């Protein structure tokens, strides 16, 4: 995922650092894209000024004797280093700040800026050494805590990052960027309400900050408060305009979650127009096309997303699902294989590949893949259900029964698991358990004629012909309504014998 360029205050001056945007929609989704250029923050006066070195006056020996060259002034060198930093010439800035530090080894702000330059050059270890030195000299320097938090954030040490953002805010409760980044980290941790609170604080400090509304919208979406998310994405768009691809994509994802597919498509179209290389927007638009029963358009978007980012796991996964639905087994297997090459810990990829293998009658391969999915995620109910189906196809009813029961334990509302287990109970002659399972399915408002038919069979074996007749009548009505003539005739034959 590409970085979003945002202004970031360090030691009283402005630099630009990257802020990643999370993915908007997954198998449910976040959802991450490129945000337009941020506004330029005018540099303020540098931080603490170090007293200038005194330059001794030379004695005039004669008019032909030149005056000695004054010693370099660390403050002037520092200011020059800051200018180069703000101009984006980070290597030159480091070289000048090296000179300032050589003259004054206790120049905390110079270490801070040198650390920031190394950070922007992605030399994280050296950046961290410099920031630590800055803090050892000035332990109350809020920007240094923020910068160190940023370094930890970029190197995926978010536990340390949030501690430093907390410290930055302890020393400066008005530190806008510290609230913003702490909100990002809280979102990574799944603490979405805490993230909303942080973005609230950021908005209170700067009501014109489009990025704060954008990321608060993402946090609201993670909390499934899509109306609030839409309001924030809209505010972000109003502040930044049609360049705001990330906000259009976020709003489109929330409209999708609310089932408003036309609005979702409109926003995601705008996101793609604003940034044709926005892979996440294309991924999310593919979900909308799929919901509109336009699988080919969805696949085209996923093809484009993969062309933009050849390592885009979610795009391969979703393309594999759509291709499998079209019956292209080999292509689907290739996509799921690609997902597992990129992410060997993807339980969903193993489960999806198992589904395809089961459909292709590679039942043993399906059992193996379902087992891998369960090993990675022992609470993956759908994988237990799939493996139960595979065991049943292999004729191992006892193993199937165990997996269906595990599915129900993990997901007590899984009507398909109750139905499948009920069928096994019928096959092994446990008619009371079969009746109980089919009743659970019917109570979940599933209008399946086979369930009524099978419960009627169980009721006949339990000695309740009147209840069986009622179930058969309902089954015949449903078979007729769905155009299943064979099922309808079978029911009529049985009813004629009662």
Image (spheres, grey):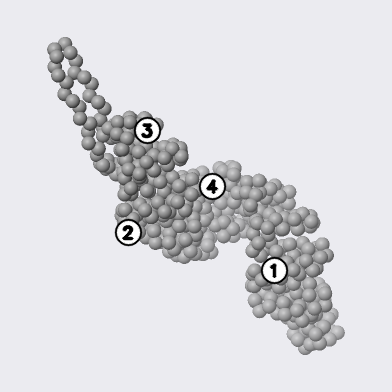
Instruction: Kindly identify which numbered label has been placed on residue 204.
Output: 2
Residue at 26% across, 27% down: 72
Nearer to the camera, 147 or 299: 147
**Of pointers 2 and 3, the one earlier in the residue sequence:** 3
For mark 1, what is the residue? 406
Viewer-side label of 1, 4: 1
Judge whether residue 174 can be spotted in this image. Answer: yes
Taking the image as shown, residue 278 lies to the left or right of residue 8, namely right
Q: CA distance from mark 1 to mark 2?
A: 49 Å
Helix, strand or loop for disc 4: helix
Q: CA distance from mark 1 to mark 3?
A: 60 Å
Residue at 32% across, 35% down: 105
Q: CA distance from mark 2 to mark 3?
A: 35 Å
**Of pointers 4 and 2, the one earlier in the residue sequence:** 2
Q: Quadrant of residue 441?
A: bottom right
Judge whether 495 appears above or below 163 on screen: below
Residue 120 spot, x, y in % from top left? 42, 39
Helix, strand or loop for disc 3: helix
Judge whether residue 237 can be spotted in this image. Answer: no
For mark 4, what is the residue? 279
Helix, strand or loop for disc 1: helix
For mark 3, what is the residue? 94
Taking the image as shown, residue 293 lies to the left or right of residue 387, namely left
Taking the image as shown, residue 108 lies to the left or right of residue 301, namely left
């Amino acid at each position: 995922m590409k970085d979003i360029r945002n202004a970031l205050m360090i030691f009283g001056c402005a630099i630009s650092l990257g802020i990643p945007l999370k993915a908007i929609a997954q198998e449910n989704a976040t959802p991450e894209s490129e945000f337009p250029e941020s506004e330029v923050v005018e540099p303020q006066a540098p931080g603490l000024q170090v007293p200038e070195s005194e330059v001794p006056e030379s004695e005039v020996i004669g008019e032909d004797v030149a005056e000695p060259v004054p010693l370099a002034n660390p403050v002037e060198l520092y200011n020059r280093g800051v200018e180069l930093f703000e101009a984006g010439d980070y290597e030159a800035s480091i070289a000048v700040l090296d000179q300032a530090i050589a003259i004054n080894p206790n120049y905390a702000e110079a270490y801070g800026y040198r650390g920031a330059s190394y950070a922007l050059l992605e030399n994280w270890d050296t950046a961290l050494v410099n920031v630590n030195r800055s803090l050892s000299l000035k332990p109350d320097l809020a920007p240094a805590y923020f910068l160190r938090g940023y370094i930890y954030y970029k190197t995926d040490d978010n536990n340390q990052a949030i501690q430093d953002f907390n410290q930055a805010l302890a020393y400066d409760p008005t530190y806008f960027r510290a609230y913003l980044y702490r909100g990002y980290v809280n979102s990574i941790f799944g603490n979405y309400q805490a993230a909303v609170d942080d973005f609230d604080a950021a908005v209170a400090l700067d009501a014109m900050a489009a990025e704060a509304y954008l990321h608060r919208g993402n946090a609201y979406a993670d909390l499934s408060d899509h109306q609030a998310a839409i309001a924030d994405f809209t505010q972000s768009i109003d502040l930044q305009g049609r360049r705001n691809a990330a906000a259009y994509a976020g709003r489109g994802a929330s409209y999708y979650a609310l089932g408003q597919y036309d609005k979702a498509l409109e926003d995601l179209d705008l996101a793609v127009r604003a940034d044709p290389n926005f892979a996440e927007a294309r991924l999310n638009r593919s979900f909308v096309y799929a919901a509109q029963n336009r699988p080919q358009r969805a696949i085209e978007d996923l093809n484009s997303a993969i062309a933009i980012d050849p390592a885009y796991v979610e795009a391969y996964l979703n393309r594999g699902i759509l291709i499998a639905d079209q019956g292209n087994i080999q292509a689907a297997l290739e996509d799921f294989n690609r997902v597992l090459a990129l992410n060997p810990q993807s339980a969903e990829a193993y489960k999806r590949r198992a589904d395809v293998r089961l459909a292709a009658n590679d039942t043993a391969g399906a059992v193996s893949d379902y087992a891998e999915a369960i090993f990675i995620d022992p609470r993956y109910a759908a994988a237990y259900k799939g493996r139960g189906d595979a065991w049943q196809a292999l004729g191992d009813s006892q193993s199937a029964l165990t997996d269906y029961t595990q599915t129900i334990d993990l997901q007590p509302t899984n009507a398909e698991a109750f139905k499948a287990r009920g069928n096994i109970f019928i096959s092994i002659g446990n008619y009371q358990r079969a009746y109980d399972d089919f009743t659970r399915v019917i109570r979940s408002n599933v209008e399946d004629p086979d369930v009524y038919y099978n419960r009627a069979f169980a009721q006949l074996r339990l000695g309740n012909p009147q209840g069986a007749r009622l179930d058969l009548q309902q089954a015949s009505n449903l078979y007729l309504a769905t155009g299943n003539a064979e099922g309808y005739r079978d029911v009529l034959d049985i009813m004629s014998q009662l």
